[in-house]
Image (tube, rainbow, N blue to C red):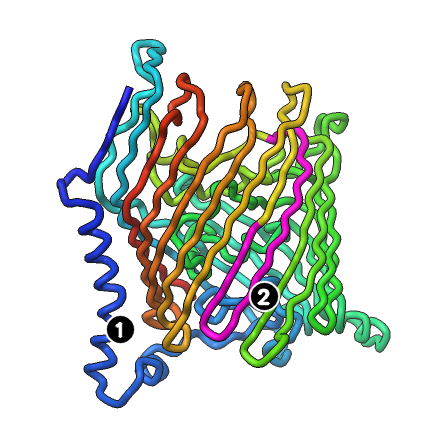
Amino acid sequence: MYADQRNASGVPVRALLALALAFAVSSPVMAMEAAGSDTLQQQQVGRANPQPLELQHFRANDARGLGVFEPPKEEGVPYTGFKLHWGGSFTQQFQALRHRNTADSSVVAGTDVNELIVIGSGFNNAVANLYLGAQLARGIRVELTSYLSSRHHNETWVKDGYLLIDGSPFENQRLDDLMKVMTLRVGHFEINYGDQHFRRSDNGNAMFNPFVGNLIMDAFTTEIGAEAYFRKSGMLAMVGMTGGEIRGQVGRPQDRSPSKLGKLGFDREVAPQVRVRLTGSFYRSTKSINNTLYSGSRAGSRYYDVLENTKSTESAQAWSGDLQPGFRNRVNAWVVNPFVKVRMVELFGNIEQAKGRAVTEAADRTWHQYSGDAVVRFLEDQLFVGGRYNTAKGRLAGMSRDVRIDRKQVSTGWFVTKNLMAKTEYVSQVYRDFPASDIRNGGKFSGAMVEAVVSF
C-alpha cells in the first residue's frame, strides 16, 4: 500500500518553510535597522533583563545555559542564606509534515494496521515544565522539576527531584578542601549518560536544542540513585549507581539488579575562543523488569503521528518518529561525545553502541547510532543556523535482519531575549530495510516545524 499526505490547506511545505525562515531571519534584522546605531544586544539589556540567578552551581533554564553541560562547579553566586527559586518553560510547535510508506495491507479486526493516518498542518498542544529549587546551605541545593503538561501525560507529574552537594554542611577544613573538586548528586534524577541529554529538548524546555527533534534513539531516563563527580582543571570523572528503573520498586528482587554508569572526559579552552570537550560514558544494567534508557522520555517526540496508523492518538503513540530498541530486561551501552567550539562555530558528535534484550529474548541485539551537527551562532549568540545528520542501525525483536533509520535536520533560530526563542526546522527521515509487513516499510516523513520557546 502507499500513502502520501500533504498539509491540509494545500500550501506546499517548502513555502511554509521559506516563510518561517524569512520571519526568523528578517525580524532581528529589521529590529536592528529600526534602532539605528543601537545594537540588538543593547535593546535587550534595556528591555528584557533575565531573572537574577540566586542558586549556586546552577545551570540557568534560559539562554544563559547554552554551552553548559553538568551544573557548574563554580559557585556562580555567593551564599547569603536560604533562597527559593521558581522557574518555568513552555513550547508550542506548528507542524507541517507529510508521510508515506509502502507496507503491505494487514487487516486486523476490520482495520488495516499498516494504513497511515491522514495528517495535515497545524499547531501541536503546548507543553510546559515547572521548576522549584532551594538553596539549603552553602554549596547544597535541592532541585525539583514537574511536567505541567506533556504529549504522553496531559496531567501534571513530577519528572525528578534530587539533592546536589558541592559544599560541606559542617565547618571542617578537610571536607571543604575535598568539596572543591567533588560533587555528589542523590535522589531521583536525569542520569548523566552521555552529553546529548544536555542539548536535547526536555518537554517544555527547548532552549538548548538548536533543532526541534531529538535523536532517533533518545538516551534519556530518570532513575533513583547517586552519582559522585571529580572535577579539576577541566578534567571530569563520574561514577554512579541507580535502581535501574524509572520507578522505585521492592517487589520481585530476583528480577532486578542495580545499574552502573560512569563518565570520563575533559572540557577546557585550549586557545583563545577555542573550546574542546570530549567525554565517554557507559551504562550497564544486567537485570531489570522495565529498563527505560531509550524509552524514558515520557514527554514523547516532537513529530506528531508520523508513520502511525489510523488509530494513532497523541498520547498513546507519543514516540512517533523515534526508535526504541526494546532493551527492557538488560542493556549495555556506551557513547562518545566530542564537542568543539571555535569562535561562532559549534561541532557536536554522538557515537553510540547499545546491546540488550527483552525478557522474552534468548540473545542480545545490537544497535549503533551516529550523529553529527554543526551550529553557527552570531550576533552574540542571538541568531543561529544549524544542520544535523543522524542514523541508527540495528535489529528489532522478531526481525531477521538489521534495519536502519536516517534523519536530516536543518534549522535556524533567534533568541529574541534570554528567555524567548523561536526556531524553524526542515526535517527528512527515511526508514530502510523494514519488512513489508511493518508499517515503516518504505517509510518517509518530511517537512517543516516551527517552534517557540519561553523559559525562565
Do the residues bearing badges 1 and 2 touch, measured as CB atoms within 8 Å?
Answer: no
Q: Quadrant of the N terminus?
A: top left
> Badge 1, how many Cα within 10 Å: few under 14, some, many 20+?
some
Residue depicted at x 48% and y 33% = 404
SS under mark 1: helix
| Foreground tag (1 vs 2) | 1
Along the horizontal axis of the image, is 249 left or right of 117?
Answer: right
Residue stretch in magenta: 327-350
Along the horizontal axis of the image, is 51 left or right of 6?
Answer: right
Q: Quadrant of the C terminus?
A: bottom left
Q: Is residue 1 above or below residue 117?
A: above
Counting from the top left corner in percent of width and height, residue 54 is at: 54, 75
Query: Looking at the rendering, which quadrant does residue 444 occupy?
Result: top left
Using the image, tell me which numbered label, if any, was put on residue 134: 2
Q: Is residue 146 above or below residue 236?
A: above
Q: Nearer the viewer, residue 220 or 424?
A: 424
Q: Is residue 257 above or below residue 228?
A: above
Counting from the top left corner in percent of width and height, residue 313 is at: 34, 31
Using the image, tell me which numbered label, if any, was put on residue 411: none
Along the horizontal axis of the image, is 82 left or right of 64?
Answer: right
The chief SS type of the magenta part is: strand
Number of disc labels: 2
Counting from the top left corner in percent of width and height, residue 262 is at: 72, 51
Residue depicted at x 50% and y 43% = 297
Q: Is residue 152 above or below residue 271?
A: above
> Badge 2, how many Cα within 10 Å: few under 14, some, many 20+?
some
Query: Looking at the rendering, which quadrant does residue 421 occupy?
Result: bottom left
Using the image, tell me which numbered label, if any, was put on residue 28: 1
Residue depicted at x 35% and y 57% = 411
SS under mark 2: strand
Whether residue 257 appears in this view of the structure is yes
